[in-house]
Amino acid sequence: MIETQQHLREEFDAYVAADKKIEPKDWMPDAYRKTLIRQISQHAHSEIVGMLPEGKWITRAPSLQRKAILLAKVQDEAGHGLYLYSAAETLGVDRADLVDDLLSGKAKYSSIFNYPSLTWADIGAIGWLVDGAAIMNQVPLCRCSYGPYARAMTRVCKEESFHQRQGYSIMMQLMKGTDAQKEMAQDALNRWWWPSLMMFGPSDSESMHSSQNMKWNIKRFSNDELRQRMVDMTVPQAECIGLKMPDPDLKWNEEKGGHDFGEIDWTEFYDVIAGNGICNKERLEDRNKAHDDGEWVRDAAVAYSEKRNANT
Ligand code: FAQ
């Protein structure tokens, strides 16, 4: 028995080392399954809670075209959540249990969604920066060793690219507008910049899952590596439309071929993930209300599928 376990473990390690995909029916170490359930379910919850800050602006979008785009984007996020819950279910967990953990406040979701969307420019900043950070993090996840997660990410990333572009387009338009519109865009960047950098997680020295998950080819780059790429990608985009980065310590470092940037306020980050951010309470209340309001839809879907099964 011990020998079989050892053999399975060696086979798994060799598979991962050869950069092959692990599929749901393959043997996998318990810790690999556990960390994937953790990450994929947190990711799913983030997509679902992530609909709330932008959803609040659907009725207030400044034109019919912007409203149609925003509606499509928010619906895409719902779809991402559903693919991700499905991917998590292939690991043997029940979606209803994962959702219960979100609704009770036990499960984590991305810190970024605990900040308020105060103006229309925030919708631009969310698309540009939050989706921008999400893409930076998720493109390498398309090569994740777990097949269902990697495949979900391929589709998600295509949609996120459109989201990022639409956000930048809002910022571009505002920066071509009146002084008040320019100020609104700058204010949104000032408020969303640092929380967007926090999305990549704690610094490498504090990240407890990175090292093992990189060995398992779940993560391909560390939190700090991806954060650096985000800074280097965003600075020229901001400059191009006349926005000023809200970081006095930001400067190009020729030697490293990237930007140096200021210290993140980690106290704020840990406070937000502990449930004490500006909107944590409101987000959970809204999510619980949406879940309760949707009960009749779930009941109807179950009744329909039971009837169909009875007839076949
Ligand atoms: N917020 O050891 P690490 C999106 C937790 S999707 C909250 O470094 P790991 C699309 C972490 O879970 C955004 N918690 O962990 C969209 C762990 O806690 P645990 C979501 C955080 O897993 C756009 C502890 O800290 N994307 O935005 C955060 O190796 C617009 C230690 O951290 C994903 O989920 C945080 N920012 O690295 C939707 C991508 N950072 O579980 C709507 C997939 C860390 O031990 C609108 N996830 N923690 O209790 C990942 O790549 C990773 O899970 C990281 C964290 C990079 C987030």
Image (tube, rainbow, N blue to C red):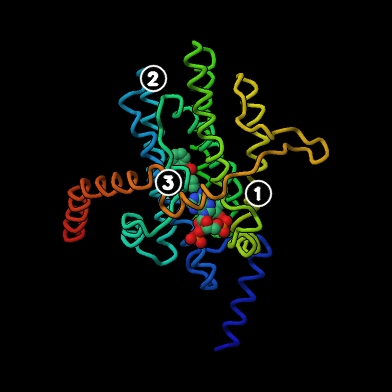
Q: Which mark is nearer the camera, 2 or 1? A: 1
Q: Amino acid at mark 3?
A: Gly
Secondary structure type for disc 2:
helix
* Other residues around mark 1 within 10 Å, as few (<14) / some (14–19) / many (≥20): some
Secondary structure type for disc 1:
helix
Q: Earlier in the sequence, mark 2 or mark 1?
A: 2
* Res 277 label: 3
Viewed as shown, does residue 206 lie left or right of 117?
right
State the quadrant of the N terminus.
Answer: bottom right
Q: For residue 79, what is the image quadrant?
A: top left
**Which is more toward the observer, 24 or 141?**
141
Q: Amino acid at mark 2?
A: Gln
Viewed as shown, does residue 301 lie left or right of 265?
left
Q: Where does residue 53 sit, x and y in percent of width and height?
A: 38, 36
Give the residue at x 64% y 76%.
Answer: 10
Q: Earlier in the sequence, mark 3 or mark 2?
A: 2
Tag 1 residue: 224
